[in-house]
Every structure is written in C-alpha cells, then in structure tokens.
C-alpha cells in the first residue's frame, strides 16, 4: 500500500512522523514523505530506506506581519493545488498527517480525492493548523487522553495513541529512581531563561546540600552558571546540549523542564517526577503540563509563580521524602506503544 506521511515544520512534528514511516515501511508499505525546506535535511537523514521525499512550499502563518501571513497562506494554497494535481498521476492509498502548516496541503489534496486521512495532534490542546484541517479528516489520533479546543461540530473519530518517541526512551521505560538526589534541568534545545534565573538560586538556598544538578542551558550561559554552582559548592554539570536525553532522564530523581509535547511524553515513557514550567505564551505547553500533573507525577506551575522561594521549599520537601518521589515516578509512567498503535490504525 502506498502511504503519504505529511510532516510539519519542526522536529516535534518530524521525529514522530519518521518513526511511524519506518514502522510502516517495515510492514512492506511504500512510503512517501512530504516536508518543507525547514526540515528537509532532518527528513533526509531519518527517512527509511526506499522511501521517497517530496517538497512542500510552506511556512508558519503565525507571523506578526500581515504581509508575511498572506504570503504564508499563498504558499500553502499553491502547494495544496500542486499536490492535488500530483495525485491525478500518483495517488496514495492513505495520508497520515502530523500537524503543522506544512501538512495542510496533503490533507486538502486527500480530501479532494476522497483518500482516507489520519491526523495526529501532538499537544493536549489542538493546534491551529490541525483545527483547520479537522473538517477534512475522519480520524484524529492524539498524544494525550484529552485534547482541549476541539471543534464542536467535528465528526472525526478520536483515538488516543500517544506520541512516538525514540527507541532509547522505550528501552529504559520504568527504570527505578537512582535515589542519589539528582536534579535534571532542561529547557529544550535553546534552553529557557526562566530556569536559569530561578533554579540556581533556589538550589543554593536548599537545606539539602548533597544535591547534584545537571543543568542544560544556552551556550552563552554555561560559564556563568558553572561559576555560580561552584561558588555555592553545589555539584553540577552545566552543558548546552544533552546528547543522551533518555540517559539523563533515567539518571534523575526529579526533572525541571518546559512543557513541550515531546518532553512531557518522554518523561511519561520513562516515568519520572517533574516540575513543568510551560512557556507563558504557549497554551499548548500549558495543556501538556496540566495533563501530566493530573496523573500525579509532578507539578505544572505558571511561569509567574515559579519563584526561587517556591522552588526551594518544593525541592526541600521532595528530596527529604524519597518515598514521595518514588510514588510520583510510578504515577507518571505511561506505556508508550504509539508507533504500533498508529501503524495499526492506518492499516485498518
């Protein structure tokens, strides 16, 4: 069966798409992957052997400039028309879209030709692109048990599949807490300034001075944070990039992070207690953090309330009660079979 996998314009959309593409290819299906120029190299490096790639002309519509918004919509419309014409000659049997504006053309073309289309929403609040294309799909697959902001008139079937993650996370799922008072701080690929501003001072004020910190930050902040931790005699490893994130999470007794969907699902896959500080301007991250906190695995706290005083009190309480951290870890653990579930759903 020929299957078109439509990716978005960021790694958060691409990596799950590639994981599913690889699984479907292993089951004998012919895979075509559509992407725009922003993630072209990412897709080329990760696509399964034998798969074909087609280029989509697209960009995000969230720009502040009205002219840039109109230009972005024009590019998406041109790509939608081009794909619709392409399907006259080479039509897939299924289209699987992983969100983002770069996936809109494939969903539209599939709708025109009545091709069964499956849409995946990675966040706990539906994104604008997916909300727009929901009118053309019959099946929505979700990363979280509930999704906020769903269109009221949508007739799409909703299936909770989870979010695909790399195998190194699945292989280490459910490992016990190390019990070494190890704190992991990660703000994503670019770091998070609020974590750099709050965490070091809060740790320095803790009663428990035996804590070990792994702190991922922006490259320009590495030396400053290293000096701060050393000055306060806190054992810390400060770095700008974590090459083995699965290992870093497994080695942590507690994680402080942003609320991106991939980060939250990775925490749930391994099973680690966490304090999640969603990006203030991003409702998706707030919804992801709230979904995680409802399980009892940790805290979702607004950026405005994430103060050194609050964090010091919380860290002291948690690290003085290892049994509570262990209970939180068990509550946070969620079995991740997303790749298989999505592939099974598409094949049906």
Image (tube, rainbow, N blue to C red):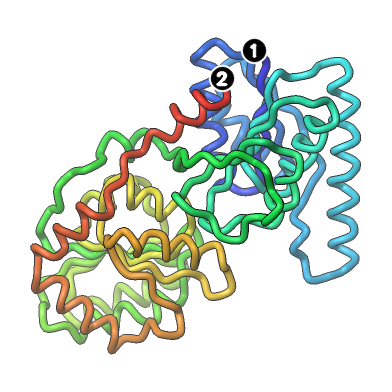
Which disc is residue 16 wearing? Answer: none
Q: Name the disc covering residue 347, or none.
A: 2
Within 10 angstroms of label 2, few (less than 14), some, or many (20 or more) residues?
Answer: few
The residue sitting at 56% across, 17% down in the picture is 49
Picture coordinates of residue 42, whole percent (x, y):
59, 38
Position above or below: 292 against 172: below
Q: Is residue 113 visible?
A: yes
- In the rendered image, the quadrant that contains the C terminus is top right
Distance between the Cα atoms at labels 1 and 2?
A: 9 Å
Residue at the (16%, 72%) spot, across then down? 318
Q: In this orientation, which residue lies closer to the viewer: 163 or 56?
A: 163
Counting from the top left corner in percent of width and height, residue 105 is at: 80, 39
Q: Locate residue 223: give its quadrant.
A: bottom left
> Quadrant of residue 31 in the image?
top right
Residue 258 x/y as whole percent: 43, 65
- Residue at figure coordinates x 69%, y 53% from the top left: 131
Q: Could you tell me which secondary element the residue under label 2 belongs to?
A: helix
Q: Residues at badges 1 and 2 in contact (C-beta under 8 Å)?
A: yes
Secondary element under disc 1, as helix, strand or loop, is loop
Q: Nearer the viewer, residue 65 or 106?
A: 106
Q: Height in image: 198 above or below 17?
A: below
Left or right: where 181 falls relative to 4:
left
Q: Residue 216: in sight, yes or no?
A: no
Residue picked out by circle 1:
1
Which quarter of the figure is the N terminus placed in? top right
Does label 1 or label 2 sit earlier along the sequence?
1
Q: Is residue 253 left or right of residue 259?
A: left
Mark nearest the camera among 1 and 2 is 2
Q: Identify which residue is drawn at 50% across, 62% down.
A: 190
């Amino acid at each position: 069966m020929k299957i078109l996998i439509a990716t978005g314009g960021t790694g958060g959309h691409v990596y799950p798409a590639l994981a599913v593409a690889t699984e479907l290819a292993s089951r004998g299906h012919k895979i075509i992957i559509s992407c725009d120029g922003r993630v072209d190299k990412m897709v080329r490096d990760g696509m399964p052997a034998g798969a074909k790639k087609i280029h989509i002309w697209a960009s995000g519509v969230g720009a502040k400039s009205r002219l840039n918004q109109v230009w972005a919509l024009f590019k998406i419309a041109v790509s939608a028309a081009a794909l619709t014409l392409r399907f006259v000659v080479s039509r897939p049997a299924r289209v699987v879209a992983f969100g983002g504006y770069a996936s809109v053309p494939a969903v539209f073309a599939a709708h025109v030709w009545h091709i069964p289309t499956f849409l995946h929403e990675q966040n706990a609040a539906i994104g604008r692109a997916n909300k727009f294309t929901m009118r053309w799909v019959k099946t929505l697959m979700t990363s979280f048990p509930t999704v906020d902001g769903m269109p009221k008139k949508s007739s799409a079937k909703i299936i909770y599949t989870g979010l695909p993650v790399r195998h190194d996370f699945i292989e280490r799922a459910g490992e016990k807490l190390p019990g070494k008072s190890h704190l992991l701080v990660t703000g994503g690929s670019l770091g998070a300034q609020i974590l750099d501003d709050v965490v070091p001072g809060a740790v320095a004020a803790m009663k428990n001075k035996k804590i070990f910190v792994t702190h991922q930050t922006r490259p320009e902040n590495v030396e400053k944070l290293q000096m701060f931790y050393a000055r306060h005699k806190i054992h810390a490893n400060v770095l700008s990039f974590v090459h083995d994130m699965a290992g870093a999470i497994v080695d942590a007794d507690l994680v402080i992070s942003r609320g991106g969907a991939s980060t939250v699902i990775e925490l749930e896959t391994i099973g680690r207690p966490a304090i999640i500080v969603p990006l203030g301007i991003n409702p998706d991250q707030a919804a992801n953090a709230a979904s995680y906190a409802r399980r009892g695995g940790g805290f979702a706290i607004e950026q405005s309330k994430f103060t050194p005083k609050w964090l010091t009190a919380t860290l002291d309480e948690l690290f003085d009660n290892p049994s509570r951290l262990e209970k939180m870890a068990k509550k946070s653990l969620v079995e991740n079979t997303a790749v298989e579930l999505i592939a099974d759903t598409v094949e049906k």
